[in-house]
Each structure stands twice: as C-alpha cells, then as structure tokens.
Amino acid sequence: MKKRAVLVGINDYAGNPLAGPVNDVALMGEFLRDRCGFSVDTEIVSAVQMAGTKSDILERLQWLVRGAEPQDQLLFHFSGHGDQLDTSEDAGELDRLDEVLCALGFDRTNATAIRDDELTALFSTLPRGAQVVWTCDSCHAGGMPPASARGGQPAADNRTARGWSAGAAPEPRSARGNDRRRAERRMRRAMSELPVVFIGACTEGQRAYEGPLGGRVHGALTYHLVRELEQPGGLTASLARIVDSATRAMNRAGYAQDAVLVAPRGREEAPLFGR
C-alpha cells in the first residue's frame, strides 16, 4: 500500500498575497504524519519542496497518481487563491467559465492557471477502484466540479478571501447558483465516474476565508477539517459527518462558508481513507 500526498500552499502571489496557505500545509502535513502514518521525507511532497508553478504542481500530481492501486492512501491538498476564467471550450460549462487554481505568478493566463478540466483529465487516469482525496481551500472551490451556490457574507477585518478577483468583483460571475438543486445534480453526475473524493472550502456562490485560528493564520476549511479529523473517532467517522461537523465549526467561528463534499456513490459514508 502506497501513502502519497501532494500539499500545495501558496502565499506569495504578486499584488495579492495570502498569509495562511503555508501554515495550512504544515498543519496538514503534521496530521498525515502523526495521525495517518505518512512519512514526511518520502511520501509527502509539500510546498517547501516545490516552486508552486503550474508545471511543478502538475508534475507532482502525476507522481501522486502514477501506479495507484485501490488500497493506496492518496491525498492532494491545495491552499491558495481560486478564480474563474472564460472556458477554453464551448461544451460542459453552462456559464462558459472554468474554475481554476491559481499557481505561483498567476496572471489570468493558461500558463499560470490550473483549470478544473485539466485536473479532471489527470484524475481520470486512475485505475478502477483507486481514489484520491482532494481538499481545496480556495474561493470557487465549490465549482471545481460544477457545484451549488449560496451567497456568502463579507469578511471581517482580520480575514482575507481566497479568491483572486474577490476584491474587484463583489459577486462571483458564475450563474450556476440560479438553480441549486440542478447544479448539485450536475456536479454529482460529473463526479460519478471520477475516482476522487472532493472536499471544497465553500459553495460556488460563497468565498473561502483565512484568518487567525489556533494562534496562526489558517484557511477556515483546512483548520476545522483537520481538527474534526483529529477528534476521537475522527479517522473512522464517515466523510459526510466530518465535513458537516467542519462546516458547523466554521460557522460557529464566524466564517460564512459551507464545505462541499462530492464523492463516488457510497464513499460519503466511509472514512477519510476507508472504503
């Protein structure tokens, strides 16, 4: 059984920096090492070991899925900015927008944006039965597979939205939120054939925030998700229960965002690395 994780946290966006992603990577790495038996030296590739460019991230993700088997424990974590760009194709996106992860040096071009379609293509190479857990702590995370939307609230003074265009555009440009149930059905259809458990920081119409949590700046999702998994029984609890508990913890802490869980049929009732 292989244990592999790729942990990406990008703070140093030119003109739009963040404070928490590198802390998120450290927190997730400690959790995988101390609670899940991962080796930091050989099985976890973190932001410290990569430049954070698009090519570097995709190269590490190819390593993550290479030779994957059903019993493996594979995890991809991204903390940083998310954005939406005009779709590169006409089909598939009703709002003609792609959700993207913002790589280092992000300038709204394909050279620095990792599109949801690119990640779908990469993860679709996994063999039947193999799965990756993908946690995404960025704005527009809920649309990485097409998702539902619910309006969020402005950040408090000591919190920062993890959306590249959050300052310029008060509302997301996507129109998918007009019919939440339809959007949810579309998301689950899109993911049904993809061997990925996806945990996103917020629904598509919300923003993902970072702020002071546990004495350091963290993304709200990363911090509360890890804390829920660290509770007694957290690693054996169902993902549905963990994600719901993380959402309630974020809301209690004043973060107006709801975590998104999308998984193959039946996987929502299994634990993080379970079946």
Image: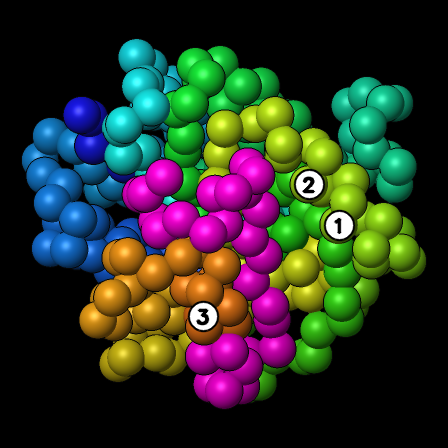
Residue 146 in which image quadrant = top right
Pointer 2: residues within 10 angstroms few (<14), some, or many (20+)?
A: some
Quadrant in which the N terminus appears? top left
> Which residues make up the magenta segment?
248-275
Tell me, yes or no, if residue 113 can be seen here: no
Q: Residue at x 58, y 57 (%)?
A: 260
Label the magenta part by its dominant secondary structure. loop
Q: Which residue is mark 3?
A: 246
Q: Which residue is mark 2?
A: 188
Q: Which residue is mark 1?
A: 184
N-term mark: 3 or 2: 2
Q: Residue at x 49, y 34 (%)?
A: 196
What type is the residue that disc 1 sits on?
Glu
Classify residue 62 as left or right of residue 152: left
Q: Which percent across, then down, holds residue 243?
A: 47, 63
What type is the residue that disc 3 sits on?
Ala
Quadrant in which the C terminus appears? top left
Q: Residue at x 76, y 67 (%)?
A: 150
Tell me, yes or no, if residue 66 can be seen here: yes
Q: CA distance from mark 3 to mark 1?
A: 20 Å
Classify residue 171 as left or right of residue 266: right
